[in-house]
Image (cartoon, rainbow, N blue to C red):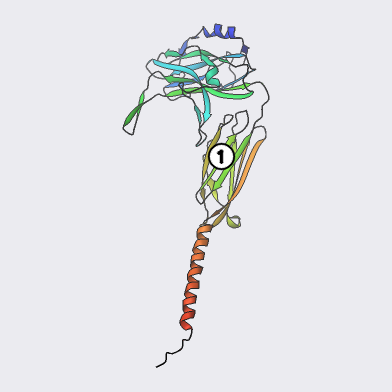
Amino acid sequence: MAIWSRTGAVALAAALLAGLAPAPAQAAGNGRWAVTPTPPATPGPTPRQYFFLESPPGQTVIDSVRVANLTDKPMTLRLYGADAFNTSADGGFGLRQESQTQQGIGAWTRVGLADVVVPAKRQADIPFTITVPANATPGDHVGGVVAAEAAPSGQLDGGGLTVGVTHAVAARVYLRVSGPTVPGLAVADLTADRGQLTYDLANTGNTHLVPDVAVTVSGLFGHSVAATGPAARLDLVPGARTRLRAALGGVWPVDAVTTTVTVTAEGGVRATSTTTTLVGVWPALAVLATLLAAAAYLLRRRHRARRPRPRGLA
C-alpha cells in the first residue's frame, strides 16, 4: 500500500464518491448492507477481505472502502474509524462505538464522507485516510472502518426500559507501524474442577495473533478426560487478555485431574501451562474421617459394655 503525504491525502479525500455501481449479488455483511475493501484496479485471484496496511510513523495511508446497499430502498449510513478489542469473557473480536474513546485506528482514521446515502441495490467506494502519529508505537494497530445505521432500526426491551438498537457492519483494518515486532502469548490462572476448566489467554506482544489452542486432560491413573471448548479461533489484538472455558467430561467423583493448555501461533510463538487439581478428595477425606470417628465411638461403647462390673453389697 502506497504511503502519501498529508497534502495528497486531503486532495484524494475531495473525490468522495468514485461512482455508484450495482451491488454484488453475494457480499459479506448483515444481509442489508456490506462493508469491504475496495478491490484494486487489477484485482488478484483472491479478493481482499480485510485491510492489511503498513506505514512508518508520521505518514498517512490512503485507501478506499466499498459500501453496498443490498436492499430495495435507499439507505443512509454513518462511516467512522474504530479501535478493535477482545471481550474479556470469551475473546470475541469487537470494535468500539463512535462515542467511545478511540486511541489507535479510531483516532487516526478520517473518512471522506461521514454520512453517505447509498441507493437501492447500489454500492459506493468511499476514500479514507489513516494518519499515523510520529510517536506511534511499532507493531500492529487493529481496528475497522464501520458503516452504522444513521438511526436505530431495532429495539431491546429489558428491565422496563426500551433501548434503541443501531446495527453496524465493518471492514477490519490491520495496520503495522514500522519498527521491532515482538509477538508473545501467555496462559495464566489455569484451574479445573469436576465440570469445567478455566484459564486466561493473553497477547503479550505487539502483533495481532490467531493462536491455536490445544488442551489435554487426564485423571487419576491416566484415565481419559474430555475437554470441550469453543471451536472458533481467536483473533487477539496486542494487549488483549480474555478468560476462556472448556467443559470437562469423564472426571471421577474422586480424582486427580492434570490439565495442560498449549497455545501456538505463526512465527513459532508458544506458551503452555499445566496444573493438577484434586477433585472430591477433601469431601471424601471428610466422609472417611467421619466414618472412622463413628467406628471408634461404637468400639469404645462396645468395649465398655463388655467390661465386668462389681456387684453391689446387700
Compared to residue 209, the image places residue 146 above or below, namely above
Q: Position of residue 144 (x, y in %)?
A: 52, 22
User: Picture quarter containing residue 57?
Assistant: top right
Total residue callouts: 1
Viewer-closest of 43 and 174: 174
Residue 167 visible (yes or no) = yes
**Which residue is label 1 attached to?**
200
Compared to residue 81, the image places residue 275 above or below, namely below
Compared to residue 124, the image places residue 100 above or below, namely below
Q: Give the residue furthest to the left.
A: 160
Residue 26 visible (yes or no) = no
Compared across the picture, whether 17 is left or right of 132 comes to: left
Location of the N terminus by quadrant is top right
Q: Give the residue furthest to the front.
A: 313
Compared across the picture, whether 70 is left or right of 223 comes to: left
Viewer-closest of 251 and 56: 56
Q: Position of residue 75 (x, y in %)?
A: 40, 16
User: Picture quarter containing residue 184?
Assistant: top right
Location of the C terminus by quadrant is bottom left
Q: Position of residue 51 (x, y in %)?
A: 56, 21
Q: Position of residue 28 (x, y in %)?
A: 48, 24
Identify the element where label 1 is drawn. strand
Identity, as a three-letter code, of the amino acid under mark 1: Asp
Other residues around mark 1 within 10 Å, as few (<14) / some (14–19) / many (≥20): some
Residue visible at 65% across and 37% down in the picture: 270
